[in-house]
Each structure stands twice: as structure tokens, then as C-alpha cells.
Amino acid sequence: MTTTSKNETTIEVDPALPTLRIVREFDAPASRVYRAHTDPELVARWLGPRSIVHRVDSWDARTGGSYRFSAWRDGERVAAFYGSFHEARPNERLVQTFTYEGVPDGVSLETLTFTDLGDGRSRMTSLAVVDSMEARDAMVASGMAVGVVEGYEKLDELLAEG
């Protein structure tokens, strides 16, 4: 599944593995994209679809740290998520778990890599591994692609602010 904007977001589902890969380029260096993924004030500004506001309850983006945030629409909480940071290697790599509070047994392990492309551009690649093909397919069916694409469009806007 691919959606095209100025910077293309590619979402790949491997038919043989319970994985989900997201690849996105940004008009900013890897250090700024990494910071936008680890600074709670920035994360709350870009994460998810435009129809949702995220509130960060806790955020400790360091190796061994954890996080929790909730999603709100029209003043009503619609979802909450939490996880642990297993590795935070500044400007290069972030490994974390991700759990939707409504399905606490559905933990995914996500590895994000940040690569400088030169000329002030970078690429972020995320690989999520879940425990079953059914869990992966449920993630895709949930409409997560809209949140991913719109979220990265909002991140483009945030990065353009400087």
C-alpha cells in the first residue's frame, strides 16, 4: 500500500511474515526526525490522523524508559497506548514495544532506523513485528494507514517550521 504526497509513505505487509514495514523520507536531517520521535511535546503535535489529538501521559525516551499516551477526538478519549523503549540510540535507532490498551496481549516490537541521505534529507524505516498474521492484519484493517500517512504529513509541517 503506498500513498503519495511530496514525500511518499510506503507501508509494506509481507505475505509470509507477521511484519509491517513503513518507509518515509523527510526534508530534514536524521537528528531532527529522531528528536521528533523522542521529544514528547513534538510527538504529541504530529502523531496520528488530523482528527485526533494526542495527550502524552508519560514519556521517557531512553534505553529502559517507557511511555503512555492517549488519543482524543471531540473531547472524548478514543484510545490509549503504552510501551517500553528498549534502545534509544540518538539520531540512528529507536527500538520500542507498542501496545494498544484495548488489546493488551497484542504487543508489537518496533525498530525505527534513521538514515541521513545528505542535502538535509533523511529516511526513517520502521519494522514492526507482531505475534501473528491475524494481529498484523487487524492492525492494517484498523485504518492505521490513515494515521501513519497523515501523521507524517503533520511531521513534515512541523519540520518545516525549523
Image: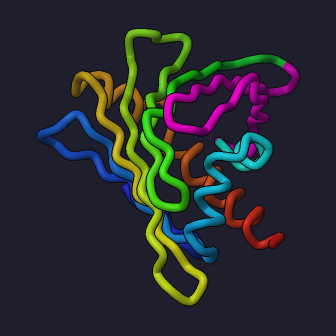
Q: Is residue 11 above or below residue 133?
A: below
Is 79 positioned to the left or the right of 159 in the image?
A: left
Q: Is residue 152 above or below residue 15?
A: below
Give yes or no for residue 35 being in the magenta stretch. no
- What residue occupies the far left of the structure in this picture? 16
Residue 5 % position (x, y): 57, 70
Name the residue: 52% across, 24% down: 83
Give yes or no for residue 71 being in the magenta stretch. yes
* Quarter holding residue 50: top right
Q: Is residue 54 above or below residue 147?
A: above
- Please name whichever residue, 65 or 5, is drawn nearer the observer in this view of the structure: 65
Give the total number of marks visible in the rendering.
0
Quadrant location of the C terminus in the rendered image: bottom right
Name the residue: 81% across, 17% down: 76
The magenta segment: 48-75
Residue 148 % position (x, y): 55, 48
